[in-house]
Amino acid sequence: MQSNRFKAFAASDTHPLWEQLIARRGKIHYRPEDIRSPFARDYTRILHSKAYRRLKHKTQVFFNIDNDHICTRMEHVHHVESVSSTIAKFLGLNEELTKAISTGHDLGHAPFGHQGEVVLKTLAKKHLGRDFWHEKNSLRFVDDIELLEDGYKKQKNLNLTYAVRDGIIAHCGEVDENGLMPREKLIPLDEFDTPGKYQAATWEGCVVKISDKIAYIGRDIEDAIHLGFLDQPQKDELLKMAREIDADAMNTTVIMYNMIIDICKNSSPDNGIRLSPKMNRQLKNLKDFNYKYIYRHQRQEPFRKYSELVIMQIFELLYDCYDGINSWKALENKGQFYPSTVEYFGKWLDRYCETDVVPAGEHRDLSLLCTNNKIYGDLSTKEIYVQAILDFISGMTDRFAIELFNETITY
């Protein structure tokens, strides 16, 4: 097996589009004698973000926040990083870029996994007339939501490089395709208006995309077995499927390993990042298996209903408080009954509204510390306010959403 086949095409300083790939939307705080590359800096900026920390309490597939052995969104992110870094290293691609994209790819994922995303999608279509999808919301988080303190204690946007931001919004792993190749043009990223519309601009982004699918399909099966979602005939079907490729396959770890090796064997600059036809067929069959026996399992139904109830209740409580620049006052009037919800959402508005419309006192003090993009302006329309609620909810952990929901049913 030949290694380093993609080395000449890696995102390095010899790449013809290098300056555009490392371009940032704004300035970041540079430290003297920093030894990190632009992508290594992005990786650590993501690692220090609050959105990254919250992934440890966000559902991947199974809502089981008190079970230490069920995969969370953070573990999924690390599985993707592991798979993609292994492939990138063998192929001769930029491991630092691959790690940064992998670590940031799900920062905007909703609480309660994909079911939370379904609820937010419903709200976005109803109130804003547009879609909600986690790949684009992850880009929104790294571009406009997540803040880091600079050397002067001012909160500023992450301002990641183009290549990392591009890999995040282009990572959609739900589309069945093989032979991934980077697109030729570095388009404005707001042109992504549907999931998977364009491929990533780098080979590293393509590697993360296929690694995402391998990682979630494999680990979701492990969790399903652990929780008793699969009966013996289904386990037998799974084993038979695996042994069509590898007669010695015993579990999903072996399946994932075989897919990684298969990608390393079959990928080339001419044919793209690809699985062999038989392995690609197995990946599709495993995905179909997961949808049939895991994601649509009847035992998931109570969780679907519960997550919808929690998110809708929080949304409706905050939605009723809109009153332009007087929204803080409307929120304050409900503070007696919903103190945590009012406090945290009020601070959310403080960070992203123009300082001159933020109420004087603690609210304005917080606003002055934030020199980020003021994406909500002066709350001039209800649509802007709705977007603020959706941003607020999409950033929540399962635990925090439940805490605020419980506040609405406590008298």
Image (cartoon, rainbow, N blue to C red):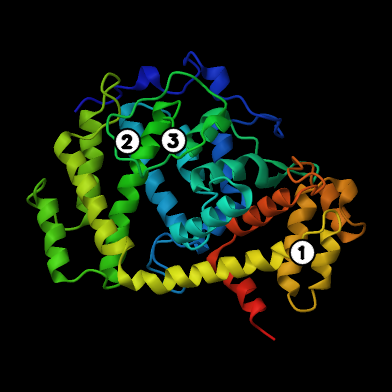
Q: Position of residue 25 (x, y in %)?
A: 66, 29
Q: Which residue is mark 3?
A: 98
Q: Amino acid at mark 2?
A: Ile
Q: Which residue is mark 2?
A: 87
Mark 2 or mark 1, which is nearer the start of the sequence? 2
Residue at image x 21%, y 39%? 280
Mark 1–mark 3 CB contact (< 8 Å)? no
Q: Indicate left or right for 249 with 137 as reference.
A: left
Residue at image x 65%, y 35%? 159
Q: Indicate left or right for 36 with 93 as reference.
A: right
Residue depth check, mark 1 versus mark 2: number of the one nearer the observer: 1
Q: Amino acid at mark 3?
A: Thr
Residue at image x 37%, y 43%? 173
Q: Indicate left or right for 315 with 120 as reference.
A: right
Q: Which residue is mark 1?
A: 321
Q: Secondary structure at mark 2?
A: helix
| Of residues 396 and 149, the one drawn nearer to the viewer in this rendering | 396
Density class for disc 2 (Cα within 10 Å; few <14, some 14-19, many ≥20) is many
Among the 4 quarters of the image, the one containing residue 268: top left
Q: Is the residue 263 above or below the residue 222 in the image? A: above
Quadrant in which the N terminus appears: top left
Mark 2 or mark 3, which is nearer the start of the sequence? 2
Among the 4 quarters of the image, the one containing residue 260: top left
Q: Position of residue 70 (x, y in %)?
A: 38, 66
